[in-house]
Image (spheres, rainbow, N blue to C red):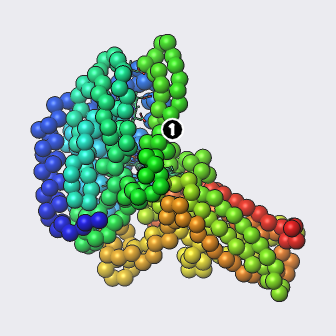
Amino acid sequence: MIRKFSRPLIIIAMTCSWAMLYGQAPGKIESALSCKKCHEKVYDQWSSSQHARSTPVNNVLFAKIYELSQKDTDGQTKLYCIRCHAPVTQTNGDVDLLQEITNEGVTCDVCHSITQLSDHPGSWPNVYEPGEVKRSARRDVEPEGHKSAYSEIFENGKICSGCHGDMLDIPGTRSCGDLTICDTDFEWQGTTFAREGKSCVACHMTGVVEKSFFRAEKSIIQHDFPGAYSPAKLQAAAKLSLDIKEFEGEVIARVEIVNDGVAHLLPTGPPARLVFLKVSALDQNDREIWSNFESNQAVEDPFGIFHIVFADQNGKVPSMPWLAVRIVKDTRLRPGETRRLIYKFPGEGVAKVTAKLYYRLAPPPLLDKFEIVDETLRTPYLMADEARSIGAE
Ligand code: HEC
Ligand code: HEC
Ligand code: HEC
Ligand code: HEC
Ligand code: HEC
């Protein structure tokens, strides 16, 4: 990847394309409620998705982190973060997020007004042309109430990349523009999935066909965008296997994790995400007598935790992305990768060994810092598990 452009150039370029957009956009982004009249099922699915919860008004984790980033950078991240999190701002200029439509987040008309991704070093801001014409991968449709146009980027999934592509050059950061914070699109490129034409849309918008005489919805493409907030999606992500052997009074547990269901890193996206492995030895009464960590896995079992960790310029770890200058650790699972881990422990009293793979949306210390109590964010999701009894084979 080319990362040679200096930051001032990029900021100027971004400002220009924004100004250009104002000139270009004759229409306004419409509210999802106006689509609901004729696309009720799609509306219901979309409202349950994270796309409908991407602004500070409806997403506490984003709200707190957005606020801190502005404090740390004297407000320089203010416009930057909302480009993707409150994309309606790109057409109405409501950067203080006061209007209801802005807080619909990644709303229907945001996506269906994207005509292209601008050619931009390292990232590809969307070009929005809101108006009568709604774009999609469909050709022979006759909508009521609006016009329709076929667009290739809806078919090949490129429409997702303007926001799920690179997030670098956060203004006001010290990362010198060389540090990729998250780039799901780049992670996907070059994978077998990408070569076979299996795009973001193919995995995250599985088609459901439904016919109705009364409504617009003849065929419905799933719009709930399952990802890390979806237990079912997380269970489809990786395979886990466990093998145990006893040798000279010790148990040797071999764990294998295969990232075969995800076409990008696992975990992908914001650096707060992490996947961790818990291995336990149980006695006959299912009481735990050994485990791979007690309280702080990052210290006790650093290889059993899959995440990216940054350091800031003073060497403080972990660092928030906007203060990061280097990567300290990156143990995320690559697409298609098989990761093997071996644990050894005393065999006395061990009747059973279990291995469990979990997903966390954000680490508890971060949630504590922001006093976030939301159970959805606090509870780790079980992705896969396996158990083996001693002497079973
Ligand atoms: C994150 C972007 C995104 C958002 C938000 C979004 N859509 Fe879509 N929509 C798409 C894509 C991509 C397709 C094409 C998928 C395909 O054909 O494989 C699509 C397809 C459609 C279709 C055609 C359905 C079909 O079965 O072919 C309709 C209708 C539609 N969207 C309406 C809506 C409505 C209404 C909302 C809001 C409630 C909405 N969309 C929100 C990206 C989005
Ligand atoms: C008055 C009813 C009505 C309203 C309001 C409406 N649509 Fe549609 N739309 C339709 C009908 C009918 C179709 C054709 C459906 C089919 O053939 O399956 C359609 C098809 C679509 C398609 C697929 C075809 C294309 O244009 O690419 C998209 C995308 C779409 N609508 C988006 C939207 C969005 C976004 C909104 C809100 C801003 C909206 N629609 C509001 C009736 C409506
Ligand atoms: C082969 C299927 C597949 C393809 C293709 C795919 N994904 Fe995923 N994606 C998954 C699965 C499974 C998960 C849940 C596990 C996880 O979070 O990594 C996921 C998770 C996600 C998440 C949530 C991650 C988080 O931590 O919040 C996002 C965002 C995402 N994918 C975006 C994309 C984008 C953008 C593309 C295209 C560049 C894409 N995906 C292509 C299967 C796929
Ligand atoms: C205009 C920007 C934008 C576009 C275009 C966009 N997304 Fe997103 N997407 C976001 C943002 C912002 C979030 C994070 C919302 C939040 O704060 O949790 C997100 C979250 C997600 C998630 C994560 C849900 C979870 O459970 O963690 C998935 C999956 C996803 N998007 C898939 C897609 C796919 C597939 C497309 C293309 C059809 C797409 N997105 C297009 C901005 C966008
Ligand atoms: C290039 C587009 C883009 C920019 C710019 C961006 N984000 Fe995001 N952000 C996303 C997407 C897409 C997701 C969802 C990805 C996923 O879940 O894997 C996301 C997810 C998040 C989440 C997790 C939200 C949740 O519900 O779990 C936080 C927190 C976050 N971003 C904070 C920020 C902050 C703070 C900034 C500015 C410094 C920022 N983002 C700038 C695209 C962006």
Tell me the residue that label 1 is attached to: 206
Instruction: Return the x and y of residue 225 as percentages of the image width and height.
Output: 47, 42
Left or right: residue 239 compared with residue 51: right
Nearer to us in this view, 80 or 264: 264
Residue 222 in view (yes/no): yes
Question: What is the tally of numbered marks visible in this picture?
Answer: 1
> Circle 1 sits in a helix, a strand or a loop, which is it?
loop
Left or right: residue 54 compared with residue 4: right
Beta carbon at label 1 within 8 Å of ligand 1: no
Nearer to us in this view, 34 or 188: 188
Residue at figure coordinates x 24%, y 67% from the top left: 3
Left or right: residue 305 compared with residue 330: right
- Label 1 amino acid? Thr
145 in relation to 194, above or below: above
Instruction: Return the x and y of residue 55 as percentages of the image width and height.
Output: 36, 47
Nearer to us in this view, 53 or 130: 130
Question: Hey, which quadrant is residue 72 in on the image?
Answer: bottom left
Q: Quadrant of the N terminus?
A: bottom left
Residue at figure coordinates x 72%, y 81% from the top left: 344
Nearer to us in this view, 207 or 8: 207
Crowding at mark 1 (Cα within 10 Å: few <14, some 14-19, many 20+): some
Question: Hey, which quadrant is residue 105 in on the image?
Answer: top left
370 in relation to 15, above or below: below
Question: Hey, which quadrant is residue 75 in on the image?
Answer: bottom left
Residue 104 in view (yes/no): no
Instruction: Return the x and y of residue 14 as percentages of the image width and height.
Output: 17, 54
Q: Residue furthest front?
A: 196
Residue at figure coordinates x 52%, y 54% from the top left: 262
Instruction: Return the x and y of residue 254 as percentages of the image width and height.
Output: 70, 73
178 in relation to 248, above or below: above
Q: Residue furthest bottom?
A: 248
